Image (cartoon, rainbow, N blue to C red):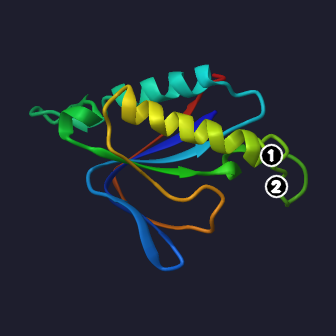
Amino acid sequence: MRVVVQRVSRAEVRIGGKIVGKIDKGFMLLVGVTHSDTEADADYLASKVSQMRVFEDEAGKMNRALAEVDGAILSISQFTLYADCRKGNRPSFIHAARPELAQPMYDYFNEVLRNRYGLRVETGCFGADMQVDLINDGPVTILLDSSR
């Protein structure tokens, strides 16, 4: 499982011109699932995201976690995180999980963030054509991969 974490001052996702998810300060997550992912992968990454200390403290150091700054999450499913671009110019998505595996794993990941860590999580719509707008704060962008 892969998650791109972007620290944002705001983010929103639209489908058909309508806002379906919106946050202020927090994380915008792009979440990709591969064939071999299990709930243990989702648990591991949810723990990392919830405890990641990338928000500034009084001394200006990145030392605070999301809950400490009353932040929220906008989580977007993103199968293209498993693009394989080694051959040719057209990416292969053979390593991305099929929707019947990916969607339950994506939903589980978001529920762990909500229920185990008490975070507010907004989402887009799995598999939909979405337009995401965000202000990357810092910029801070971190790639997490449960297999590494």
Q: Position of residue 32 (x, y in %)?
A: 64, 43
Q: Is residue 52 left or right of residue 39?
A: left
Q: Earlier in the sequence, mark 2 or mark 1?
A: 1
Q: Is residue 143 visible?
A: no
Mark on residue 84? Answer: 1
Q: Position of residue 14 (x, y in %)?
A: 47, 70
Farthest residue toward the left? 58
Q: Secondary structure at mark 2?
A: loop
* Crowd tier of the residue under label 2, counting other residues whose Cα lies within 10 Å: few below 14, some 14–19, many 20 or above: few
Q: Indicate the amino acid at tag 2.
A: Pro
- Marks 2 and 1 in Cβ contact (< 8 Å): yes
* Crowd tier of the residue under label 1, counting other residues whose Cα lies within 10 Å: few below 14, some 14–19, many 20 or above: some
Q: Position of residue 130 (x, y in %)?
A: 56, 67
In the rendered image, which quarter contains the C terminus?
A: top right
Q: Secondary structure at mark 1?
A: loop
In the rendered image, which quarter contains the N terminus?
A: top right
Q: Residue at x 25, y 37 (%)?
A: 55
Q: Residue at x 43, y 24 (%)?
A: 47
Q: Indicate the amino acid at tag 1.
A: Asp
Q: Please, is residue 5 above or below residue 65 in the view?
A: below
| Residue to which mark 2 is pinned | 91
Q: Please, is residue 45 above or below residue 86 in the view?
A: above
